[in-house]
Image (spheres, helix red, strand yellow):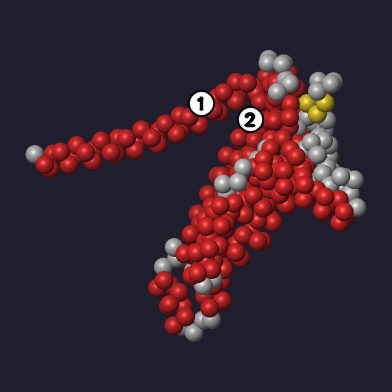
Amino acid sequence: MRANFKNIKEKLIEDLLFIAAISSIVVILFIFIFLMKEGAFAFLENGVFNFIFGTKWRMETGTYGMAPLIIGSLLVTIGAVGFAIVLGIPSAIFLSELAPPRIGNILKPTVELLNSIPSIVYGFIGVVLLLTSLRDTFDMIDGHSFLAGSILLGVMALPTIITISDDAITAVPKDLREGSMALGATRWQTIRRVVLPSAISGIMASILLAIGRVLGETMAIMLVVGCVARFPSPFFNFFQSGDTMTARIASEMGEAARGSLQYHSLFGIGVLLLIIVTVLNVIADLIRVRIQKKVGRG
């Protein structure tokens, strides 16, 4: 009797977990269908090529081309993730491998606390401190620029990279470290050739999540990037003001008439953003699998 009850309980738990997993897939599917339904008209009316690669976004003339927004999002993402990687991964190595326990117990909760700060607060800090500093340092007009957006979002992405990378490095079995040291490797050689390759999948996951946060951030980037839909000149001019896909949706959705071309074009941006994030996830998974295979063969 007790064995049957145990089997029923385990089967119930399995079914509940299966339902939870299916539910998440269904929710994502419904989101994608809704975005496609609302955004398809923009692709049909503007033309797929003109809508994606068009160089002008002007609601006054009904001209909607996403290229300046795509370039702006790309520049901010590259700058922010690069900034977060350069500072985040060394910080994670320090916390997990080098920091004394007393210091680590203080620093890690502090880093995790940064994740709980609302993005609008980061935006206010960016307006008050960051824009002023950039304006005075680089003799800019007002400081609004892709550089300001990159630095601000890089700081916001730091806790994600540091926390997850730290957990991945800490999870590397202690036996691997001791075996490397026993063979005569120095502490740094052990970290570089044993610990980091073993933790690479977790580090890749942290970078992927950081990219997702940067691409999806709206309020903070709106306050510092300038919200001007134009191409940077030259192409990688981080000191010029511009716009991103998410910032454009937030700045215009409130005034877009439901059912208008502007309304559907904003949903079209959402469709492209969802596709980009999905592709990035697939690419990151493929890279992670290849790295794991390479490390396994090594």
- Whole-percent x and y of residue 251? 73, 30
Residue type for callout 2: Val
The quarter of the picture where the N terminus appears is top left
- Asked if residue 42 shows in the view, the reply is no
Q: Is residue 269 above or below residue 151?
A: above
Q: Earlier in the sequence, mark 1 or mark 2?
A: 1
Q: Secondary structure at mark 2?
A: helix
Identity of the residue drawn at 65% across and 61% down: 87
Q: Which residue is mark 2?
A: 271
Q: Is residue 60 above or below residue 152?
A: above
Identity of the residue drawn at 50% across and 31% down: 28
- Whole-percent x and y of residue 288? 53, 54
Q: Nearer the viewer, residue 133 or 176?
A: 133
Q: Nearer the viewer, residue 14 or 226?
A: 226
Residue 158 position by quadrant: bottom right
Identity of the residue drawn at 56% across and 76% down: 188
Q: Secondary structure at mark 1?
A: helix
Q: Which residue is mark 1?
A: 30
On screen, residue 14 versus residue 117, left or right, reads left
- Whole-percent x and y of residue 126? 74, 47
Residue type for callout 1: Phe
Residue 192 position by quadrant: bottom right
